[in-house]
Image (spheres, rainbow, N blue to C red):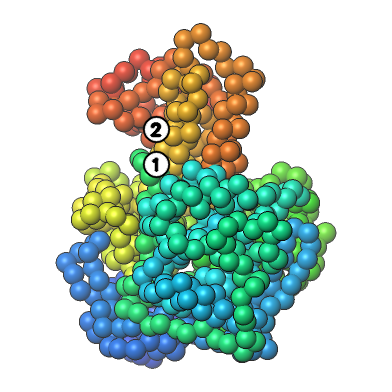
Amino acid sequence: MEAPKLLWQPTHQQVRESNLFQYQQHIEQLTGQQFDDYQELWQWSIDNKEAFWSSLFDYFSLIYEGDKSPVLTGAGMPDYQWYDHIKINIAENLTRYHHPDKVALIAVDESGIKTTYLWRDLLSTAAAIQSQLRVWGLAAGDRVCGVLPNAFHTTAAFLAVSASGMIWSCCSPDFGVESILDRFLQISPSVLLTIDSYRYGGKQFDLGEKNATLRSRLTSVGNVLNLSAEPAPEPLPGTTYLARLEKHADALPEYVRVPFSTPLWVLYSSGTTGAPKAITHGHGGVLLELQKYHAFHNDVRAGELFFWYSTTGWMMWNFLHGAWLMDATILLYDGSPGYPHVDFLWQLAAETGIHHFGTSAPYILANKKAGIKISEKHDLSRLRSIGSTGSPLPPEGFDYVYDDIKPDVWLTSMSGGTDVCTAFVGGNPMLPVYEGEIQCRTLGCALYCFDEDGRSITDEEGELVITQPMPCMPLYFWHDEGKMRYKESYFEMYEGIWRHGDWIRITPRNGIIIYGRSDATLNKQGIRIGTSEIYRSLDNLEEIADSLIVNIEQRNGEHWMPLFVMLKDGVVLDNALQQKIKNRLRGDYSPRHVPDEIIPVSGIPYTLSGKKMETPVKKILSGRPLEKCVNPDTVRNPESLGFFIELSKKLNA
């Protein structure tokens, strides 16, 4: 196969100035080995995983106490334990470069207000929140859940919770009530963090009714802390306002060092086969991974400004705070990325001098569709890198970046997931960027491409697998006895090997191309959505007998998320019913749950054991050969497949 177009090549000076090159030199001196290229360094990092991960403690002067030995105990994934004799706190490490008069973060909202916060502001606010949580009797291990925007007070609350050894969990305010409850009810929070309203797309949304419902149904919650800047005229009974807490300008939070694998936060899967999985990550594993990625694969440096567009409901919100580990400043933007115009985030980058700009593939493609020549409208002279994740960035997206955004920028397409709160594959400041390819497998990540028989393949499409443990892998899923759901999620296809659910190819250049999800998980605009959430909502509509939804990730970078509905006798799918379906999904969950098209069908295919056949339908509609999509003998009602087969012929003609 012909090599793709070369789009960017680091200069000799850029390579030698990179954090990754300097670390490579350090390891060469430490081990006496010589690495001729990145691939050899990567191979060393997985062949010597204990030495690799342990090297980060001293190289970055991480704060911890105890003995790094033994590194690993246990017999295999997912039952390994890391660093049993270490105590650590991620918040203490995130804030280790703080100085009272140094800028910690910049917060921007849709109204255009830009506020600069010093470390003094941030840490004194975190200390006030921590003090209030302790007044309420909370201690390490208690859960604190928030329905919060991407704003200063949310970050302060996260630092307060994590510094205390408590467990953080957060949803975005645009989540529907049922979606929030599906998540938070699982972990029985003691405190709920809220705000009174939020702004998105130029509109203000009141959260009074939602807050009241959550307060009444989250029966484990003993107290509510509202982080709004000003108390509401008629506050919810039993609510304490952050604005009324006593703050001391030079106060610092107390950092409670906890065992390495102590839970840090709970993130949530999409809920494809039931309630969303409550994925629990640990202090130490997240710290090592974020330190590694921001240093070596984002090449973040002291004094730089790091931005990644995210809501608090996406793992990238958690990830972006890792830039502090490199003594950088972070920028938080709360609002719609396309308001008041589609290229607003590029305007923000120019006005604030962002060095590292993170976004999603759909945002890049939206600017391309609009025909905007960013380089002619906005001064991006300080921009060093553009990060893209959430879904695969197609070749046309790569070309748009270099043709119309910035010809000398380093494009770092990356892919990982909520499962590990990082990327398995991503940027490399020492390597060229080729059209349509992610640059490399990250250090310490033993990633390969397997065929259905478990054989490692190169330059062919197959399953993304991880063959060795990483410290950022989940500790467990909440309330998952014996890690049964955990094992079913990642280790069912290949025993003892993590199967991630991405369909990939490793190229002859050791780059990676990701073609989308190989399972039934929906992935819309970077947010993983569970099909079970869709079905749970539609079950309440009397007109619908059954339904099935898939998300087709097309090779040109477009997404198509059709909803197939089987209607009850006598019901017609008219405009009114279509709007009713959309309103229900938007109200129960979020705008991202609304399908691109609603299509009536006479039947929904099921397996013999009674499971909806989402993955086979997705494969059929993606144009794969029928024999590689489904065995008709496993279908309870094989006649239902006929519609999807005929639709595929039209779509892929």
Q: Position of residue 75 (x, y in %)?
A: 16, 67
Q: Position of residue 566 (x, y in %)?
A: 46, 19
Residue 371, horizontal then vertical, whole percent = 77, 46
Please indicate, yes or no, whether residue 35 appears anywhere in the rendered image: yes
Residue 602 in the image, given as x and y percentages of width and height: 44, 14
Determine crowd level at label 1: few under 14, some 14-19, many 20+ residues with C-alpha closer than 10 A: many
Up the image or down, 497 lies above or below 58; here it is above
The quarter of the picture where residue 421 lies is bottom left
Q: Nearer the viewer, residue 599 or 350?
A: 599
515 left or right, relative to 384: left
Q: Residue furthest top?
A: 570
Gap in angstroms between the C-alphas marked 1 and 2: 10 Å
Q: Amino acid at mark 2?
A: Glu
The residue at 75%/58% (across/down) is 110
- Identify the residue position indicated by label 2 in the image: 614
Callout 1 touching callout 2 (CB < 8 Å): yes
Question: Residue at left 40%, top 57%?
Answer: 220
Q: Residue at x 76, y 50 (%)?
A: 202
**Residue at 30% of width from left, 83% of height from top?**
86
Nearer to the camera, 340 or 404: 340
Q: Residues within 10 Å of mark 2 (few under 14, many from 20)?
A: many
Give the residue pinned by disc 1.
272
Q: Amino acid at mark 1?
A: Thr
Q: Which mark is residue 315?
A: none
